[in-house]
Image (spheres, grey):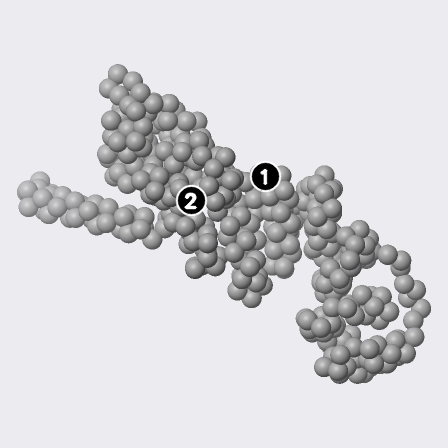
Amino acid sequence: MQRMDVDLDVPAFLNSEKQNVPSNLQHYYVDFEDLYDRKLWHQLTQKVLEYLNEPESGPYQISLFQKFVVDWESKINKLSLVYIGLTTARKFTELQDSVNFLSEIITKVDTPETKDAYVYAVMEAAYFKLLMGQTEETKKAIDECEKILDQFDSVETVIYASFYRVSAEYFKAEADYAQYYKGALLYLACIDINKQLTKKEREDRAFDLAIAALLGNTIYNFGELLMHPILDSWTGTEHEWLRTLLFAFNAGDIGKFESLAGHFSELPVLQQNLDSLSRKICLMSLIEAVFKRSGDNRSIPFSDIAAETRLPNDEVEHLVMKALSLNLIRGSIDQVDQTVNVTWVQPRVLDRDQIDGMRKRLDIWNRDVNKIATFVQQEGGEVFAQ
């Protein structure tokens, strides 16, 4: 990609281009010339942004930037400049041309006052590098931008969305399921999924998150994903059974897991990791068994755990030790009495069924407290009177 000369005859370009674009876009060029002549830079920026959102403007965006926008780019809000530049960069057929184009934008926003726009441009350039397989360069960009963002109290949501999206794609390429899961959920929190993602993109994102949740070796609670509307994109699709599988894992439902295992042949990545999935569902079954118990009833016999997890009794201790090492629970093992004394269970994002279960336990606790209060009033009146 060659840099275009910025000494331009803007009116001549706009008039010429107006004849080339589809008729429904021609009015934009009339507005461009009028606003440019009147030096109404903010209104002109908004009109360009509106134009870029027109599907038919794609083939004309590169020339518009190189022969028009460059003439007054110093007047553009830097975040808008990056957005315009990014939209244009996506129209190049060669990825390296996109990187080169965005590199020029980066130099224009690399100032102390516009570090937010700098992060936006660097992360988007990093994404093109990732598509070219330049993972080391992508990671450097992520690390640099993370340090910059840590210095801000807040920035525009679009910048966080860019950072988390590109970071997630990097971790996906590296098969780091846990980091992908975290980054992808943070990205979804920054956007309106129904407006900013197509149906296919929602389905693909939901699928990637499901695989990451199932295979992430530090992910033992799916509540945040299960309550996310992104999973609604699976309704009526071939992957709808995956949603049921996620709920089964989150509830530690080994029976449901086994009933769905027949689908694993449809997804080789799950079939290849069947052993680790089996170990994970046992751990989640243990967590759920602890979570469902009241705080004063967490001395659990090995036999109860064996029944919940469907493991032989002699494998229970190893399972509990694994849960302790992963910091899923805290407590101690009594090898003599064959019990586990649990003092803490990992905090969880609860789905609706788990919330309802907690509500029922709170109702029971409330009734017990009321019984004690009534007993004290009836039997201890004389003591309190004295």
Tag count: 2
The residues tagged by marks 1 and 2 sit, at their Cα atoms, a distance apart of 22 Å
Relative image position of residue 181 (x, y in whole percent)? 53, 45
Task: Provide the residue designation for mark 1.
Answer: 175
Label 1: element kind: loop
Query: Which image quadrant is residue 87 in?
Result: bottom right
Query: Which image quadrant is residue 20 in?
Result: bottom right
The residue that appears at 16% across and 45% down in the rendered structure is 368
Image mark for residue 144: none
Q: Tag 1: residue type? A: Ala
Relative image position of residue 309 (x, y in whole percent)? 31, 32
Q: Quadrant of the N terminus?
A: bottom right
The residue that appears at 32% across and 48% down in the rendered structure is 354
Q: Is residue 342 left or right of residue 262?
A: left
Task: Provide the residue designation for mark 2.
Answer: 263
Q: Is residue 31 left or right of residue 374?
A: right
Q: Tag 2: residue type? A: His
Q: Residues within 10 Å of mark 2 (few under 14, many from 20)?
A: some
